[in-house]
Amino acid sequence: MSPEYVQPYVKALKNDDRDAEAIAEAATRPTMRFVARKSEAQLDQQTLRRARSRLVNGRTRLMNQLRAIRLERGITVAKGRRALGLAVGTLVDDEGSGLSARMRALLEETRREWAELDGRIAALDREFVETARSSAPARRLATIPGIGALNATALTAAVGEAEDFASARDLAAWLGLAPRQTTTGGKPRLGGIDPGAATPICGRC
C-alpha cells in the first residue's frame, strides 16, 4: 500500500506498533488500492534509469563549471553542448588564450571527464534501445508520435503490462494527468491538467 493511504489510520504519535496497527486497519478497507509488485526486469530497468539520471546530472554540473570558468574571465559561450565543447577545446589548445598552464591542464582533465560521461550515457542509451526492440509493449508504445526508446522503456518499467489498471483513465490518473477539481456548494468544477504534477517516469524529467 502507498504510505499516504495508511497515514489517516495512524492514531496519536507515530511508532512501530501504531504503524503496524494502521497498516492492518487500512488493509481491511474494501476500497483500498494496493501497489503492484514489480518484476526483476522492471526493477533493473528503473535502477538503470536512475544511474543514467545521475550521470546526466553530473555532466550538467560539469558543463556549468566549465561555463563559469569562462564567464569569470569575461568570455561567454553560446548555448548547447557542442558550442561549449568547441570553446573549451580552443582554450585548452591555445597557449596564447591567457590561461595559465595549470588552468589549461585542469580544463583538459575536465574535458576528458566529460567525454567519459558522454560515453557511459551513450552506452546506457544503446542498452535502452535494445531493450525497447526486444519488448513488445515498448515497441507498441514507440509507435506513438513523440515516444522514443527512452520514454517507452521508462513507462514499461514503471507500469509493466498495465493489467492492474481497469481503464486508460485509471492509468492517466495514476500518472497524475488528471484535471484539477474544486467543489464549492456541492458543485464540482473541473479545471485544467497540470503537467508539473505528473509522476516523472523518464530520466530526463
Image (spheres, rainbow, N blue to C red):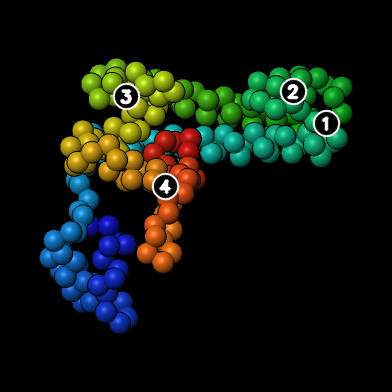
Is label 4 in contact with label 1 (beta carbons under 8 Å)?
no
Task: Quickly name the residue at label 4.
Answer: 179
Q: Which mark is residue 75?
A: 1
Give the Cα separation between the discs numbered 3 and 4: 23 Å
Give the Cα separation between the discs numbered 1 and 2: 10 Å
Q: Which mark is residue 112?
A: none
Residue 198: x %, y % from top left: 42, 44
Q: Nearer the viewer, mark 3 or mark 1?
A: 3
Is label 2 in contact with label 4 (beta carbons under 8 Å)?
no
Mark toward the start of the polypeptide (3 vs 1) = 1
Give the Cα separation between the discs numbered 3 and 1: 44 Å
Q: How many marks?
A: 4
Q: Amino acid at mark 2?
A: Ala
| Badge 4 density bin: few <14, some 14–19, many ≥20, Cα 10 Å | some
Q: Amino acid at mark 1?
A: Ile
Give the Cα separation between the discs numbered 4 and 1: 46 Å
Q: Nearer the viewer, mark 2 or mark 4?
A: 4
Can residue 2 be seen here? The reply is: yes
The vertical placement of 204 against 29, above or below, is: above
| Badge 3 density bin: few <14, some 14–19, many ≥20, Cα 10 Å | some
Is label 1 in contact with label 2 (beta carbons under 8 Å)?
yes
The vertical placement of 125 against 65, above or below, is: above
Can residue 44 be seen here? The reply is: no
Task: Quickly name the residue at label 3.
Answer: 141
Quarter of the image with the N terminus is bottom left
Q: Nearer the viewer, mark 3 or mark 4?
A: 4
